[in-house]
Image (cartoon, rainbow, N blue to C red):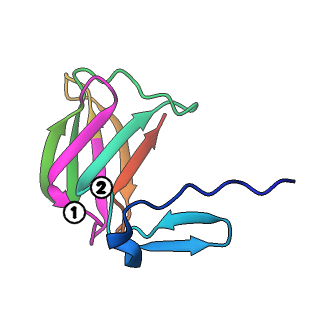
Amino acid sequence: MANRAVPPLFNLKNVDKIVINKSSARRIQSGPTFNRLTVLWVDNSGVPFNTTGFNAALYRGSTLIQTAAFDRFGVVFFSLVTTLTTANYTLVVYDSFGRIYRTKSIPAGVEAFSVIG
């Protein structure tokens, strides 16, 4: 097998943030990619549902932390919950009539979560 080419490094001011690992260059991630908890609702194939009209509630124990509406692309964003999460949460997904569709536990230490099915 042939060696893969390594792209050149142009920004040499940030050399301390770049690690050269044998034949590839990688950036060290200094923090989470998402700064607020993001939940994605997908089918078994990983394709997001059309979630127009769906809502979610986030609980820590029995305390309601925040409610938020899903967008039409299967994503709900909790602006009050920073990441990486420091507590376990319970996510409850409702339709527009208030019927519960899913209840999931979100562990501590995550920045994003996926509800499958």
Q: Residues within 10 Å of mark 2 (few under 14, many from 20)?
A: some
Tell me residue 41's x, y (percent). Answer: 39, 35
* Residue 102, position as x, y percentages in the image: 37, 39
The residue that mark 2 highlights is: 90
Q: In this view, does 23 lie above or below 56?
A: below
- 92 left or right of 43? left
Q: Circle 1: is it few (<14), some (14-19), or many (20+) Cα within 10 Å? A: some
Quick check: can you spot residue 30?
no
Rendered location of residue 17, percent (x, y): 39, 74
Q: Distance between the residues labelled 1 and 2?
A: 6 Å
Residue 60: mark: 1
The residue depicted at 33 percent of the width and 44 percent of the height is 39
The residue depicted at 34 percent of the width and 30 percent of the height is: 74
Q: In which quarter of the image is the N terminus?
A: bottom right
> Dividing the picture into quarters, in which one does residue 89 lie?
bottom left
> Which circle marks residue 33 in the picture?
none
Q: In this view, does 86 lie to the left or right of 101?
A: left
Contact (Cβ within 8 Å) of mark 1 with mark 2? yes
Residue type at tag 1: Arg
Q: Which residue is drawn at 24% across and 32% down?
A: 70
Q: What residue type is labelled 2?
A: Thr
* Magenta span: 71-92
Q: What element carries label 1?
A: strand
Decide: is 76 above or below 91: above
Which mark sits nearer the N-terminus, 1 or 2? 1
Mark 2 secondary-structure assignment? strand
Q: Quadrant of residue 93?
A: top left
Which residue occupies the extreme bottom position in the image? Answer: 16
